[in-house]
């Protein structure tokens, strides 16, 4: 990361004016709404806050040294050279995590991150903001700007060579394109990408980037171990790939079966050893054989018992969440029924509770906006982001 001219915290980082906008995802899941999903264009500030958040990963930040070296991310072709399989993720806190079975998770670079207006409106501190390079305090905008810059920086490292660029545009590598460019014959897209990276690297300082992105790829199995023993509730991994109890038992039985083969080899060797005159009368060998024989009986049984206890523990941890979810759905259902009753009363010209009336008005407005969009009128998000 070179830089003669330090990037000012309020300046636009690069001249990304060559990529036309197709702004936002169609929907975004969120824990803040009872529906669990929303149209991002209705709350762009909330959308960018959730998208550029690393809250879960930041809890493990002081243990990053265990999971990955502090260096730039490897180019994309290097991951393939190492036999890794790229899997796309839309979770930023899973970006550039890799698993020992050869998976590496990469979040595609969204088109809106190459739009100047995204940076000026949602990723730049307001002029009245108190945080500046000389102070350590950071406002929420500054925090998400550091994360967005770090994410872009990771792409500058990932797409380093033209071969990386072609791989990123080849949907077969990850199942989808990783960059918002089109492959072309004359190299225009590649030239545009080089301008993006050049602008970024010329102005970026280490302190402008979130610390997570200074550690390149992180090993997910190490993060899972750290998370199990440092976060509450205990014994929960950072990310669980298997979500069924069958997978839990199957995964643990695999390594138990491997261990059993090793134990059987040792027992066979001990049995042969006891048949030889040198070891048959050796007290230390006999004691070791005795101890290992007891271990070979108790050990596997103990492991099976532990896996069973882990399954029960996971179930008990899940129960409160399932109960809460069920209760909140029941409450939401009651509220919806209340709104429907209010609508009927309004239509019938009867008196209606003011709160219910407001909700039904809001529902009508949403319906009206949806109708407008279907008929071709611009929506709220389109107006706000497109240039
Ligand atoms: Zn600020």
Image: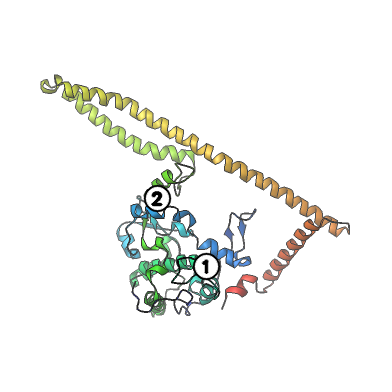
**Image coords of residue 190 (percent x, y):** 39, 76
Q: Of 343 and 327, which appears nearest the observer? A: 327
The residue carrying pointer 1 sits among few (fewer than 14), some (14 to 19) or many (20 or more) residues within 10 Å by Cα, namely many
Residue at position x 62%, y 45% in the image: 325
Tag in front: 2 or 1 = 1
Tell me where residue 23 sits by quadrant.
Answer: bottom right
What residue sits right under mark 1 in the picture?
A: 141
**Image coords of residue 209 (percent x, y):** 41, 67
Tell me where residue 351 sits by quadrant.
Answer: bottom right
Q: Is mark 1 within 8 Å of ligand 1?
A: yes
Residue at position x 36%, y 58% in the image: 217
What residue sits right under mark 2 in the picture?
A: 223
Q: Secondary structure at mark 2?
A: helix
Picture disc at residue 165: none
Q: Is mark 2 within 8 Å of ligand 1?
A: no
Above or below 242: residue 155: below
Above or below 98: residue 317: above
Residue 169 visible? The answer is: no
The residue carrying pointer 2 sits among few (fewer than 14), some (14 to 19) or many (20 or more) residues within 10 Å by Cα, namely many
**Image coords of residue 166 (percent x, y):** 37, 70
Tell me where residue 323 sits by quadrant.
Answer: top right
- In the picture, which quadrant includes the C terminus? bottom right
The numbered mark, 2 or 1, whose residue comes first in the sequence reads 1
Residue at position x 52%, y 66% in the image: 139
């Amino acid at each position: 990361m070179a830089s003669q001219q330090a990037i000012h915290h309020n300046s636009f980082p690069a001249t990304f004016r060559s990529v036309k906008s197709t702004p936002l995802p169609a929907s975004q899941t969120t824990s803040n709404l009872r529906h669990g999903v929303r149209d991002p264009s209705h709350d762009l500030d909330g959308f960018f806050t959730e998208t550029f958040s690393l809250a879960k990963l930041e809890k493990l930040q002081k243990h990053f040294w265990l999971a990955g070296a502090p260096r730039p991310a490897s180019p994309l072709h290097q991951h393939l050279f190492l036999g890794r399989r790229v899997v796309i993720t839309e979770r930023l806190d899973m970006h550039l995590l890799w698993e020992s079975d050869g998976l590496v998770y990469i979040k595609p670079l969204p088109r809106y991150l190459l739009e100047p207006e995204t940076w000026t409106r949602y990723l730049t501190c307001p002029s009245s903001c108190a945080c500046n390079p000389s102070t350590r305090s950071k406002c929420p905008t500054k925090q998400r700007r550091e994360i967005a810059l770090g994410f872009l920086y990771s792409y500058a490292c990932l797409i380093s060579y033209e071969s990386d660029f072609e791989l990123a545009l080849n949907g077969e590598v990850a199942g989808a394109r990783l960059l918002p460019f089109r492959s072309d014959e004359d190299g225009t897209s590649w030239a545009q990408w080089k301008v993006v990276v050049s602008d970024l690297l010329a102005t970026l300082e280490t302190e402008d980037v979130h610390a997570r992105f200074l550690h390149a790829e992180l090993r997910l199995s190490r993060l899972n171990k750290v998370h199990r023993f440092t976060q509450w509730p205990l014994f929960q991994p950072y990310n669980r790939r298997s979500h069924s109890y069958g997978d839990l038992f199957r995964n643990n039985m695999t390594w138990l079966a491997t261990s059993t083969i090793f134990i059987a080899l040792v027992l066979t060797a001990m049995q042969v050893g006891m048949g030889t005159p040198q070891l048959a009368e050796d007290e230390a060998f006999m004691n070791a054989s005795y101890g290992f024989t007891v271990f070979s009986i108790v050990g596997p049984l103990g492991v099976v018992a532990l896996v069973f206890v882990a399954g029960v523990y996971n179930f008990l941890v899940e129960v409160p969440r399932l109960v809460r979810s069920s209760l909140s759905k029941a409450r939401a259902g009651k509220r919806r029924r209340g709104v429907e009753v209010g609508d009927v009363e309004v239509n019938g010209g009867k008196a209606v509770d003011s709160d219910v009336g407001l909700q039904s008005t809001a529902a009508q407005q949403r319906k009206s906006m949806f109708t407008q969009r279907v008929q071709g009128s611009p929506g709220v998000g389109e107006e706000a982001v497109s240039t």
